[in-house]
Amino acid sequence: MNDQQLSELIESSLRRVLESKPEAAADTSDTLLDTKEAARLTKYKETSIYGLVKRKKIPFCKMEGKLLFSRKELLEWIANGQQKIAGSHER
């Protein structure tokens, strides 16, 4: 097998693999994070997260008294330059 044949074999193999791979669907799933995980994601200290919640400057919700954060909403909040004013959603 010469270099040209090897190159064509690799190319056709890669093409087959890529074509057989299902299209990546948009990630519509969401994950709820606790305060520690939200702090890790946003690179804020936990105490800063509590302060942002108190001032309703970060998207959050409370479930049975526990603070939770939507990973998706936090990423959007970060992407929007942290300008989003969020209200608390009681569940």
Image (cartoon, rainbow, N blue to C red):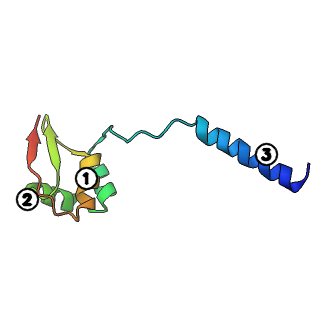
| Disc 2 secondary structure class | loop
Mark 1 or 2, which is nearer the eye? 1
Disc 2 or 3, which lies upstream in sequence? Answer: 3
Residue 25, x across and y down, in percent: 42, 39
Instruction: For label 2, count other residues whose C-alpha is less than 10 Å away and answer few (under 14), some (14-19) or many (20+).
Output: few
Image quarter hosting the C terminus: top left
Dot 3 crowding, Cα within 10 Å, few <14, some 14–19, many 20+: few
Which residue, given by chain and number where applicable, does mark 1 sit on? Answer: 74
Label 1 Cα crowd, 10 Å radius (few <14 / some 14-19 / many 20+): many
Q: Horizontal placement of 65 versus 44: left or right? A: left
Looking at the rendered structure, the kind of residue marked 2 is Arg
Comparing 49 with 84, the one in front is 84
3D distance between C-alphas at marks 1 and 2: 16 Å
**Place of residue 65 in the rendered image (x, y in percent of width and height, measured from the top left):** 12, 38
Q: Nearer the viewer, mark 2 or mark 3?
A: 3
| Spatial CA span between label 2 and label 3 | 60 Å
Corner quadrant of residue 70: top left
Q: Mark 3 falls on what kind of element?
A: helix
Give the mark, 1 or 2, whose residue is nearer the N terminus.
2
Amino acid type indicated by mark 1: Leu
Q: Quadrant of residue 46?
A: bottom left
Vertical arrangement, residue 59 with respect to residue 18, above or below:
below
Report which residue position mark 3 lands on: 9
Q: Measuring 17% from the left and 51% from the top, which residue is drawn there?
A: 59
Does residue 87 appear to the left or right of 40 in the view shown?
Answer: left
Which residue has dot 2 on it? Answer: 55
Tally of numbered discs: 3
